[in-house]
Amino acid sequence: MSSDPNCVFCKIIEGKIPSRKVYEDDELFGFHDIAPWAPVHFMLVPKRHIPSMAQLEPDDAALMGKIMTLAPRLALELGCRPYPEGGYRVLVNTGTEGGQEVHHLHVHVMGGPRPWLRG
């Protein structure tokens, strides 16, 4: 597993920075956002340091599929109402112009009653 010693998300995954964990397995780590935009707002990140979606390779397809199928389950477990009346947003910022602030691939999952703080 590759890690970046200067990456805040790598430090969270390693337990060097505390977080409110929502999920963990051999490949993924999930935790609540420290500045939530919505009543439910958590992130799923690969444990392996991947700077952004721009660095994904074909071999990462299963990892991304796992994230995208895990997100709905966790969203419901953490308080989002079911589709179609309820729902959630899944967002990946990529690069500076895409709004990415932490350069470790992360998938935001946001939901809950509106209006939300942002978005």
Image (tube, rainbow, N blue to C red):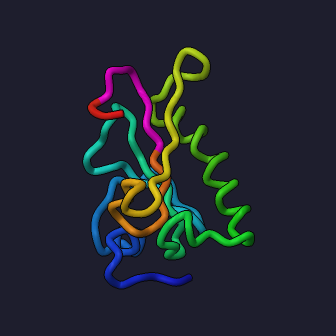
Q: Quadrant of residue 37?
A: top left
Is 39 left or right of 107, judged from the image as shown? left
Magenta part of the protein: which range?
A: 109-116
Which residue does the image show at 50% across and 66% down from the upper left? Answer: 52
Q: Which residue occupies the foreground of this view, 53 or 14?
A: 53
Q: Which residue occupies the foreground of this view, 76 or 68?
A: 68
Which residue does the image show at 25% across and 46% down from the upper left? Answer: 35
Name the image quarter holding the N terminus. bottom right
Which residue does the image show at 52% across and 71% down from the upper left? Answer: 47
Name the image quarter holding the C terminus. top left
For this orientation, the residue located farthest to the top is 85
Is 71 left or right of 111, judged from the image as shown? right
Q: Which residue occupies the foreground of this view, 65 or 100?
A: 100
Q: Is residue 63 magenta?
A: no
Q: Quadrant of residue 48?
A: bottom right
Give the total of numbered labels: 0
Relative to 1, residue 12 above or below: above
* Residue 108: % across, % down: 45, 48
Which residue does the image show at 52% across and 73% down from the upper left? Answer: 50
Is 98 left or right of 28, judged from the image as shown? left
* Residue 66: % across, % down: 67, 55
SS majority, magenta: loop
Relative to 21, residue 50 above or below: below
Relative to 59, residue 111 above or below: above
* Residue 63: % across, % down: 66, 62
Q: Quadrant of residue 53?
A: bottom right
Is 19 left or right of 84, judged from the image as shown? left
